Amino acid sequence: MSLLQFAFPSASFAAPIPHPKRKPNATSPTFSLLNGITARSGRPDPLLRVVFPSWSSRRQRRQCRGVVCYSAPVSPQTLQWVSAVSAAVLMLVKGTTIQKSFLVPLFALQAPASVISWIKGEYGTWTVFLALLLRLFYFIPGELVLPFLTMLLVIVAPYQTMNLRGTQAGTIMSLAIAGFLAYQHFSRIGSLRRAFDQGSIVATLAVIFTSIVPCLFLL
């Protein structure tokens, strides 16, 4: 009767066999993201990652494969810049009959903090001082009077008034001023079609942007 013998592998054979590394396919097209625009490139972008939410299903992930979706919310500072630029355009444009003096407090309430700091700083103070000297001895066009008065108001305004910036009360005041200006613009221009004519479309868009920004701040 022969005996059965079993041979067990040694420790050297028990080590895991390394798998060959797969080289990335350099010719496979990938998508890279630059400033919210998807562009097709020939090499993979190591900085690009697509993160799926935990509640997304496999079908949704399969459908989004190969497509990069980018959506960034608008920051409050961007909205303030839109409102400030729109108010400045309304001060200088001629295609509207609104009372432009209301744009001065609206700009002071909605302008970005960097603009307010620049006006209250050394450069802004010197600008207002030179403009005041020029106004005393020379004639200033009417379009430049409102920007000068706006800077002067920001400099001499008490801190209790400037503290309304960024608050709900200040936003409601801005919305009331913007709504009044929008009512004046569309009621005095005659019709909605004339509001978007070549001579008044810039003022109409500025009025719309000035009215929309306070509404977005209240949401």
Image (spheres, grey):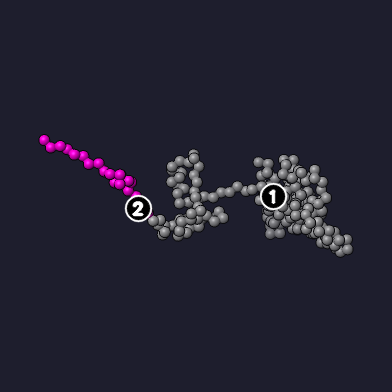
Instruction: Inspect the magenta stretch and tell me whether residue 14 lies in it.
Output: yes
Secondary structure found at label 1: helix
Identity of the residue drawn at 45% across and 58% down: 43
Q: Which residue is mark 2?
A: 20
* Magenta run includes residue 10: yes
Q: Residue at x 66, y 51 (%)?
A: 78
- Counting from the top left corner in percent of width and height, residue 145 is at 81, 57
> Which residue is outermost to the right?
137
Identify which amino acid the numbered label 1 is placed on: Gln
Q: Is residue 95 above or below residue 63?
A: below
Residue 194 visible somewhere in the drawing? no
Residue 57 can be seen in this image: yes
- Relative to residue 85, is residue 40 drawn left or right? left
Q: Residue 142 location in percent, x, y?
A: 81, 59
On the image, the x and y values in percent for residue 17 come to 32, 48
Q: Secondary structure at mark 2?
A: loop
The N terminus lies in quadrant = top left
Q: Label 2: few (<14), some or many (≥20) within 10 Å? A: few
Which circle's residue, 1 or 2, is located before the other in the chain?
Answer: 2
